[in-house]
Image (tube, grey):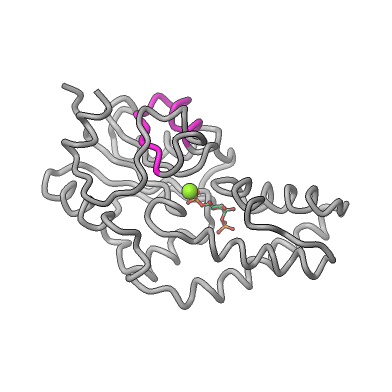
Amino acid sequence: MLEIKACIFDLDGVVVDTAKYHYLAWKRLASELGFEFHEKDNERLKGISRLDSLNILLEIGGVTLNEKEKEFLAVRKNQWYLEYIAKMTPDEILPGVRAFIDELKVNRVKIGLGSASKNAVLILNQLGIIHLFETIVDGTKVSNAKPDPEIFLLAARDLNVAPSQSIVFEDAEAGVEAAIRGGFKCVGIGNPAVLFKANIVVPNFIGMTMSKFLSLIN
Ligand code: B16
Ligand code: MG
């Protein structure tokens, strides 16, 4: 049977739903720029970097800007996003996640975070779970965004575990692709139609245990 020595978690959409706050902040920016940003388009921004998200938003609105202007707007959006994050509480950890992480700890499975977000440390502190992660690889530490596997490969290196003996948990298409390209086992959290490249897809962590994941992957 497959032996798993590490689990690497994406943040937004896996541990916590910050997508709703990203959406509110992008929507506010779109409205300032004079166009509507709809929730269905927010799917396209999941798992990708702040600047890549801004470029998609501007493409949706048909707005062309230079790099300096883009940088200014990305900072502005992040300031609004941080106002929402500052109000987050541990109640916002997604159902079943904490129990699953506790099970991993008992079984000495190593735990890492692999998130595109530059606010990951702040969010984990806000949720009161930062101490559970042995490594945190976030958007401040990599030069290549998902679907490049760099984020997850760095996390596996820090944990001193081979990708083939690690499971990545991801909710975004770009993140699943990054995990598979890096040689990891990947559990998709969410919609199987979107995350079809993952080894398995489950709707959430409710009632999930390591042995259940392993029996589904094998
Ligand atoms: P920030 P993840 C990603 O987090 C979000 O899914 C994505 O929507 C966001 O653009 C990205 O973080 C960057 O976030 O603006 O906080 O640096 O899913 O990789 O944990
Ligand atoms: Mg995500």
Q: Quadrant of the C terminus?
A: top left
Of the pair 191 and 119, the residue shown nearer to us: 191
Of the pair 185 and 72, the residue shown nearer to us: 185
Residue at 52% across, 36% down: 194
* Quarter residue 65 falls in: bottom right
Please, is residue 16 above or below residue 191 in the view?
below
Direction from residue 50 to residue 57 in the image, left or right? right
Residue at 72% across, 59% down: 37
Q: In which quarter of the image is the N terminus?
A: top left
Residue at 83% across, 60% down: 69
Direction from residue 5 to residue 151 in the image, left or right? right
Whether residue 193 is in magenta: the answer is: no
Please, is residue 140 above or below residue 200 in the view?
below
Magenta range: 176-189
x, y percent for residue 33: 83, 65
x, y percent for residue 213: 24, 35
Please, is residue 78 above or below residue 163 in the view?
below
x, y percent for residue 111: 28, 46
Direction from residue 74 to residue 7 in the image, left or right? left
How many numbered circles are shown?
A: 0
